[in-house]
Amino acid sequence: MVPTSHAEYPPDLSPEEEQYLLSNLKDWSIAHGLAVRPAPSFVSAAQDPSGVLATTAPVTLFPSLFPRTCFDEGLGIQTAYNELYSAIARDEAWLQSIIEGLVEIDDFTGKLWQTHLAVKKEGYVQDLSLGLFRSDYMVHIDPDSSHSSPRLKQVEFNTIASSFGGLSSRVSTLHKHLLAIDAYPASTATVIKADALRQSKSASSLAQGLAAAHKAYGLSRTQRPLCVLFVVQDPERNVFDQRHLEYALLEESGVRAFRLPFQQTLSHTSLEADRTLVYTPPNTPSISYEVTTIYFRAGYSPDDYPREEEWDARLHLERSRAIKCPSILTHLAGCKKVQQVLATPHSPHLKRFLPDERVASRILSTFAPIYPLDESEAGKQAKELAGDPTSAVRYVLKPQREGGGNNIYRRAIPPFLQSLPATHWPAYILMEMIEPPPLKNAILRNGELHKGGVIGELGVYGVCLWRNGSDGGGSGEILQNWEAGYLLRTKGDQSEEGGVAAGFGAVDSCCLVDS
Amino acid sequence: MVPTSHAEYPPDLSPEEEQYLLSNLKDWSIAHGLAVRPAPSFVSAAQDPSGVLATTAPVTLFPSLFPRTCFDEGLGIQTAYNELYSAIARDEAWLQSIIEGLVEIDDFTGKLWQTHLAVKKEGYVQDLSLGLFRSDYMVHIDPDSSHSSPRLKQVEFNTIASSFGGLSSRVSTLHKHLLAIDAYPASTATVIKADALRQSKSASSLAQGLAAAHKAYGLSRTQRPLCVLFVVQDPERNVFDQRHLEYALLEESGVRAFRLPFQQTLSHTSLEADRTLVYTPPNTPSISYEVTTIYFRAGYSPDDYPREEEWDARLHLERSRAIKCPSILTHLAGCKKVQQVLATPHSPHLKRFLPDERVASRILSTFAPIYPLDESEAGKQAKELAGDPTSAVRYVLKPQREGGGNNIYRRAIPPFLQSLPATHWPAYILMEMIEPPPLKNAILRNGELHKGGVIGELGVYGVCLWRNGSDGGGSGEILQNWEAGYLLRTKGDQSEEGGVAAGFGAVDSCCLVDS
């Protein structure tokens, strides 16, 4: 059998091969909780009012090829990234200088900042802060050079609600299982090998991060049992991803956690006089818990705040003595503007947070050039690049907010900017497009199989627990700092050639190749 | 809080308690593969043509109360039951004396017996035989005595395709989890305690049975890789139950297994000249496997044999050198007639197989009286009991076949027998009804909650591997014999008071009580 070359990967499957692979994938995934609640377009609420149906999470049939050097670099620098973002979150003065340019043009960022100021006025009572981060990258091949080696370029850095840590561990186990049962054709044996597949430890490792914060909180001040609070959206289709962290936290560390829909925060939590956060589960009104750690899986999007009450809830939680994952300052450190400021060519900021030049230069090498759209020299240059259809094709325009789905690409940039008052331009950043190598894969999603060109995005998880200094000026100390596994998210490329539609994301795992 | 007494168990839940329990149950079950494919009445094939949806397996919200003495006795005598049925399966002459009365009136039993005879004529080439048994019981309270203690009475003994071993392990873990997260009201704390809940080890233990047979088979005779073959129905809604055994077999013992739909047997398997069984997976036509062990999860019902080809397939498998789980003689040993002969009052047969009187008397004490409907003295007595509406209310009429759903109860017996030619009466046995104690529980099934009176059935799994003697007259030796965990299956009682409808079964776990 002729070995599959990387260009031909993954191979076409015979109907029998595909049937075997799919039936094993579909059964294994449900048997191991690699699942999501079905989309309303697939199963309506009327059909399943109590919500008992589930389906295989969108996954790739094959582990996608990923350059070994890039993978190793991504995981290798995660602790440096943790250090960087912890330092940013501790440097209120610097963050303020970045955020103050945004508050006028981005209500959401403004509201977050005001929430911070309100708590600051009263004084924070918790100096510990937890980050469960995820740094997202794509592999970049310089289109102007035919012999350049692939390099890892950062797409964004997530400081709040980094998802898929629970499912990612399972999808790498799935691909290993499919290999073990010969679901991959023999022609792939030189590519899909046990030592090329990378197990993600994210579920367990992120749960250990929560357990570390829980333990660092110390003893109860109110003689209540202690718990971690997952503040969540409701309903949540990706609930199993979150549950896997909750189960790992209970099984591996013996720590209780509760799920609290963000919009019910004020009904079920209260603050003691010393701002200890107390959670009373609705099912046991006579037993309440002291919350050690708030894990936000909601609150990152303006949609999570339909009423003023949600802002009250965020303030209420932020005022509390519980350790926040993340605190508002850490949340704000993840805004695109921070990424842009760090990645603006010749920016002086990185060395402020990472004095070790060797570390800073490794981080710097993962930045794609990002420009502000403001009155600075770099901003003026960027406006020219973005306004010209010829140069705009190499860029993407992104709003400051996290959440995705709001980016403007290439040719669409000039007309979009023209439609916007120039005063609103600074709410966006201009980023050089990362040009990933062409890849193929097949994705199972809602029971449908999509084959074709794909783009992979590597997310590296990081856990960081630190103590903020009392001066708000960057002092403090890091207590825990580790790399916490990875996510490979693969979606259809934007080629018009059919196949996997753009945006059809799936959870994937890495099959490392020496490029 | 007032402790819940056994009569009030389980307690009514407040809406908040029910919501908390159900949301945790629904998420935990899918996250841990306690699942089934949805019934066509719930999700049509047209809606989910590729079969990716799954739902929580029917489960009870609470572990059901079960008398500790009965539980201990059921598990304690399982190895004796394994010994008994192994001895019956090895005693062809005795089995023949039982079966020959049936072949005229029950085609299915007749066909199985003919298959055995055909192989016997040629000579069996495999003297090892594996049983993954399940002995099913109910708790019996003598209705004529107000102070009698509960006793365990056998419903039936399954020698083929004993199901739910995979899911049973998980439901006992589920109930433990619900206890750990305080999903059970505090009033139940004196009942639902960690030391009252019993973990079933069935998934792992049954897989170890398959691994033991696989190992006992010895080296490949054909230089092929070895495998276990799960012969299955297709489609199979209860697939995860079976998959959990397959995964445990691979993960804990490193043994490969394949699923082969029974009706595809002749397309994908072949016999070498020495009757080594070779399986060629359709996805890898160039790689074939030598089958060490055939695990039948199909072939137990006449519905599995729609064409003569399926009988050819059964003969083909039975002729092979692979170890059968079960062999045809073992399969036949599970027929109701055998149970009836053993359990007919004053029957001499039990001591033939269990010479140790103490062991035999423990087994005997689990029999409910069973009568034949033939010309024997016991049979004549039974016909009178069954024909009289007054006495018939204490009995159930069962056909010889396994599979369930064909029993005739109490008042329905006399008219049913009158509608049947008297020559067909011997195809049935008359069994004294087991009168279980009144229990309540709540069952989640297809997303609907059913509350009310229930009946619990305890199944005890057993693994037995033996070598048949060369004389077919009962010689041979037992190589492995262990109790392999339990199943509690709970279904609605037949009370007319509403609640859980009869036949609405669910997987459950035992909460032991001292009666």
Image (cartoon, coloured by chain):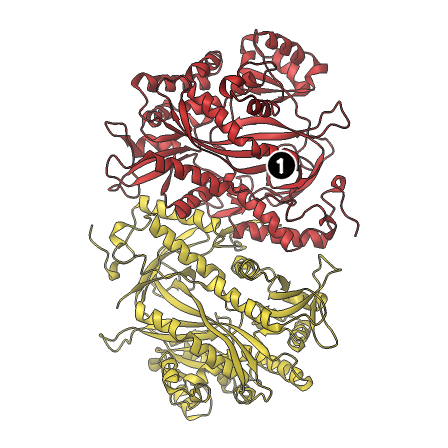
Chain colours: A yellow, B red
Q: Nearer the viewer, residue A410 or B200?
A: B200
Q: Residue at x 43, y 66 (%)?
A: A485
Image vertical order of residue B398 relative to residue B175, above or below: above
User: Which residue position holds label 1?
Assistant: B490
Can you tell which quarter of the image residue B411 is in? Answer: top right
What is the three-letter code of the residue carrying label 1?
Thr
Q: Nearer the viewer, residue A407 or A36?
A: A36
Q: How many circles with numbers are drawn on the protein?
A: 1
**Image coords of residue A61 (percent x, y):** 37, 54
Image vertical order of residue A235 relative to residue A293, above or below: above
**Image coords of residue B31 (percent x, y):** 52, 53
**Image coords of residue A315 (percent x, y):** 66, 76
Direction from residue B3 to residue B166 in the image, left or right: left
Q: Which residue ends up furthest to the left in the rendered image?
A: A2
Q: Chain of mark 1?
A: B
Mark yes or no: residue B190 visible. Answer: yes
Can you tell which quarter of the image residue A307 is in? Answer: bottom right
Judging from the image, what secondary structure is the residue with disc 1 in? Answer: strand
Q: Residue at x 51, y 31 (%)?
A: B79
Q: Which residue ends up furthest to the right in the rendered image?
A: B2
Q: Residues within 10 Å of mark 1 (few under 14, many from 20)?
A: many
**Image coords of residue B504 (percent x, y):** 62, 35
Q: Residue at x 47, y 22 (%)?
A: B333
Direction from residue B511 to residue B297 in the image, left or right: left
Q: Nearer the viewer, residue A513 or A456?
A: A513
Q: Residue at x 28, y 30 (%)?
A: B276
For the C terminus of chain A, the image quarter is bottom left
Direction from residue B65 to residue A213 in the image, left or right: left
Image vertical order of residue B276 relative to residue A145, above or below: above
Image vertical order of residue A290 relative to residue A124, above or below: above
Mark yes or no: residue A51 visible. Answer: no
